[in-house]
Image (tube, grey):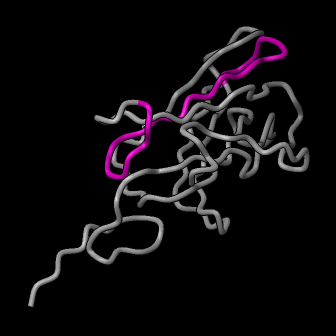
Amino acid sequence: MAALGSGPQMSRDPAARSGSGEVRIVSVDVSGRGADGERITAGSPFAVRLAFEAARPGPSPSLGVEVHGLDGVLIARAESPGDPSAHIAAGPGTAEVVFRRNALLPGAYVLTVFARDPAGHLDYDVQVKAHRFAVWGERTGGERGAVSLDPAWTR
């Protein structure tokens, strides 16, 4: 986790990216929303902000974020609904998703991000497991894995 620093790191592997290019995700910022400020801490909300560039005006794309463990297993997915009646202008835009209930345990994770047509048939830009980020904190109560299920033992 120390190698991750405090912000996300993007893969430089060109095979991690595909899509037609009508909309391209140009940056991904992952930040905490808890008492630790920008650092993502276990149990505190965090946000993923996507900056994108549209090649031409068109229908508002569907945008998505998937959180994976380093083993590649999907932990969570959030996708904005596409809206064919809403349009975006050519040029830059941004979108943000806030994960309000963060059950991720401390550790390193990777994100897949994507932009696709509103109907979900054509991928404009897909960056598969291309962005790394860390969740900080202490593991307590013998928990292991990627998420906390908030265990409470009785005897």
Q: What residue is drawn where x is 76% and y is 18%?
A: 53
Task: Specify the farthest residue to the left.
Answer: 155
> Which sits in the foreground, 54 or 41?
41
Task: Specify the farthest residue to the bottom.
Answer: 155
Task: Specify the farthest residue to the front.
Answer: 2
> Which sits in the foreground, 117 or 111?
111
Q: Is residue 79 above or below residue 143?
A: above
Q: What residue is drawn where x is 70% and y is 38%?
A: 119
> Which sits in the foreground, 61 or 104?
104
Looking at the figure, which quarter contains the N terminus? Answer: bottom right
The image quarter containing residue 51 is: top right
Magenta-highlighted residues = 38-60
Left or right? Give the position of 152 relative to 7: left
User: Percent from the top left, x then y, of residue 57?
Assistant: 77, 11
Looking at the figure, which quarter contains the C terminus? Answer: bottom left
The image quarter containing residue 50 is: top right
Q: What residue is drawn where x is 60% and y is 58%?
A: 68
> Which sits in the foreground, 73 or 29?
29
Left or right? Give the position of 86 relative to 128: left
Q: Is residue 115 above or below residue 54?
A: below
Q: Is residue 3 above or below residue 149?
A: above
How many marks are shown on the rendered structure?
A: 0
Q: What residue is drawn where x is 77% and y is 42%?
A: 126
User: Percent from the top left, x then y, of residue 108?
Assistant: 56, 56
Q: Is residue 10 above or below residue 103?
A: above
User: Percent from the top left, x then y, of residue 131?
Assistant: 68, 44
The image quarter containing residue 6 is: top right
Tell whether position 43 is magenta: yes
